[in-house]
Image (cartoon, rainbow, N blue to C red):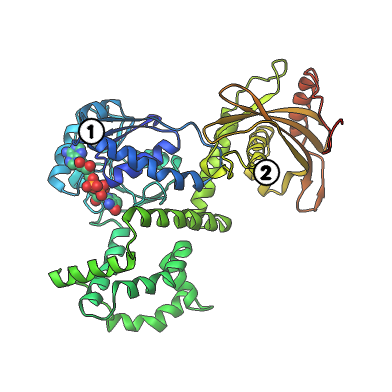
Amino acid sequence: MRQVKTLGLLGTGVIGGGWAARALHFGIDVIAADVKPEMEEWIRGSVASAEPALASLTNAPLPPKGKLTFTTDLNEMAAKADFIQENIPEQLPLKQRILAQVSQHAPADVIIASSTSGLMPSDLQKDMRFPERLIVGHPFNPVYLLPLCELVAGAKTDPKSIEAAAEFYTYIGMHALRVRREVPGHLTDRLQEALWREILHMVNEGVATTRELDESIIYGPGLRWAGMGTNQIYHLAGGEPGMRHMLHQFGPCLKWPWTKLKAPELTDELIDRMVEGTAEQAAGRSIRELEQLRDGYLVAVQQALKQFNIGAGATLNALESRLYNAAAANAPKAAAAADGPRRLYETAIRPEWIDYHGHLTDFRYQHVFGDAVDVLFREIGVTDAYRAAGHAPYTMEAQVRYLAEVRQTDSVYVTAQVLDSDAKRFWLYLRMHRASDDKLVAVGEHLYVHVDAKAGKSAPMPADMQGKLAALRDAHAKLPRPADAGRGIGFGKR
Ligand SMILES: NC(=O)c1ccc[n+]([C@@H]2O[C@H](COP(=O)([O-])OP(=O)(O)OC[C@H]3O[C@@H](n4cnc5c(N)ncnc54)[C@H](O)[C@@H]3O)[C@@H](O)[C@H]2O)c1
């Protein structure tokens, strides 16, 4: 498959807007197409409202944001996109017709994915040109924060299309769950619907209110599900013998059964109870307010799971590793020897890094310097695998001098000058510049010692790593030595 630089969106409602926000954030251009011209304003608003939560998801270095364009000409979008994601209403004849139309204009190697919640890919690809590139790529709302994407092939789908789509979705921070065969509702919506049917029954029969049913999830199973899902959790519920004992103990009640398979009739009374119950829970808060609350905790949950490297937290770790590697790979390769210090990394200043004066807050300077040094680390061989094997440079001393204000609208870049290195240690002089006018806004100095974490003591770096640092050190020795290098904190001259 071709490299995806431009994502084409077909339909720009709730789900199309979510795809746009996610793709743009990770540096993919988006060409959004909708039959209604007024959706341009809508999609721009929805991208803007996703921004604060997305910005706080990860501190890893991000590529420059993608650019958003809008058109009402579906065929133009199809001709320009490298990957098309369809998000029009859930009606089979409509989707079939539009997918067939768009497939006439999209080159053969452009994957066309449908966000359908439950339609079968074999039905969707029926009238398409090159139907082997049609897949279902089913996301979850909000698409910009939930990593899950179910991938489903139809009878005519080429398995390579599934793999290519998985690669793209992973690139934009998602977890590609390959569904073994097409079934109505895929996997997740079948599970969600089973739960929802029981909710409707219990509200209908006056057993519980919507609030009580939500409480039955959020104080208990909901907390467990995020990390382990239902089956692993039940395995634990069986004690030492695990799932076998669990089935033995609780299996018989499946026959009673507690639950009902068929959904109740959606009478006006039931609809009113559901609507009134959820309105009471909202307690006057608008959908936008509730979305912000939801987005905030979704970010926090993923960051918590990251520490355990499970579920969505493992996906976030993998994404961050990719972003750091990409930043290292994209750092200008010029040896920088004669030209100047090594330019490592550029970042936009994020809204949450700003203090009450509207300036970059002090500890974020170390954060930006740290991310920049991470780029250098990867270049000299300090990778995730190297760390996992038990070796890494540890920071012995670090200090920052703040020279000029940095504001939220700024971007900054960081350069490194290797002042000294030996078998175990290296000393970096870091400069932070404002990107718009190259003004020097801060300098930092970091001293590192290479450590064997298993032995718990310092250890020489591998020869290759020593060599790379020595080459930079020798080249940088030709640059003017910074007058304030090695200076301690103090009042200076009086
Ligand atoms: N809302 C969810 O929670 C959710 C979650 C996962 C998947 N999905 C699926 O995503 C798809 C879209 O759902 P949504 O909630 O975003 O719907 P939506 O109603 O918010 O958006 C649909 C958009 O499609 C546009 N549209 C209609 N006909 C079109 C056409 N012929 N060409 C181009 N655009 C057209 C509409 O103008 C609208 O902007 C559905 O298949 C749905 O099952 C929805």
Please give left or right for residue 484 compared with residue 172 in the image: right
Dot 2 surroundings within 10 Å: few (below 14), some, or many (20 or more)? few
Residue 31 in percent (x, y) is at: 31, 31
Question: Could you tell whether 332 is left or right of 286 in the image?
Answer: right
Q: Secondary structure at mark 1?
A: loop
Q: Residues within 10 Å of mark 1 (few under 14, many from 20)?
A: many
Q: Amino acid at mark 2?
A: Tyr
Residue toward you, 300 or 176: 300
User: Dividing the image into 4 quarters, which one contains the N terminus?
Assistant: top left
Position of residue 439 measured from the top left corner of the image (x, y, whole percent): 64, 24
Q: Position of residue 205 (x, y in %)?
A: 21, 80
Q: Assess whether mark 2 and mark 1 are in contact (beta carbons under 8 angstroms).
A: no
Which type of secondary structure does the marked residue at label 2 adopt?
helix
Tell me the number on the disc at residue 102: none
Q: Decide if residue 387 is on the left or right side of residue 212.
A: right
Determine which residue is flagged by label 1.
130
Q: Could you say which quadrant of the image residue 384 lies in?
A: top right
- The picture quadrant where one finds residue 86 is top left
In the rendered image, is residue 116 in sight?
no
Q: Earlier in the sequence, mark 1 or mark 2?
A: 1
Name the amino acid, label 1. Answer: Phe
Residue 386, numbered label: 2
